[in-house]
Image: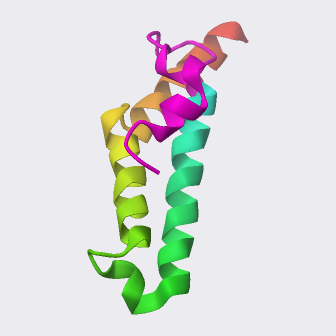
Amino acid sequence: MAPGAVEQACPALSDAGDPESDQWSPDLQCKQTAMEVTIEAVQVFGGAGYMRETRVEQLMRDAKILQIYAGTDEMQVVAIAKDLMGRA
């Protein structure tokens, strides 16, 4: 996974400019899943998973960057919750 891989896989997600839009929910889900999967991969590889030159470590770093770059997960959860509360 390279930086921007989620946006390449799901082009509509990169166009989500409005934090209250329905497009943010899949974006948040993609980032959280990427982080969960890479953390598990590092666990499977054990100590080798933390070594800087391994692909697994690079993937985990990229997944974390996705969480930070595209807006923190907490901010997105709050925005989605506000939007959902407004619809109720």
Q: Does residue 84 appear left or right of residue 1 in this picture?
A: right
For the C terminus, the image quarter is: top right
The percent coordinates of residue 66 (x first, y second) are 39, 42
Tell me if residue 2 comes above or below residue 7 in the rendering.
Answer: below
Q: Count of labels shown?
A: 0
Q: Does residue 47 appear left or right of residue 23 in this picture?
A: left
Question: Which residue is drawn at the image coordinates 47% and 77% (left, top)?
Answer: 42
Question: Which residue is drawn at the image coordinates 37% and 42% (left, top)?
Answer: 3
How did the renderer colour the structure? rainbow
Tell me if residue 45 comes above or below residue 2 in the rendering.
Answer: below
Tell me if residue 69 comes above or below residue 64 in the rendering.
Answer: above
Q: Quadrant of residue 30?
A: top right
Image: magenta residue range: 1-24
The percent coordinates of residue 37 (x first, y second) are 58, 63
Q: Does residue 12 appear left or right of residue 45 in this picture?
A: right
User: Does residue 77 belong to the magenta stretch?
Assistant: no
Q: Is residue 77 visible?
A: no
Tell me if residue 80 comes above or below residue 51 in the rendering.
Answer: above
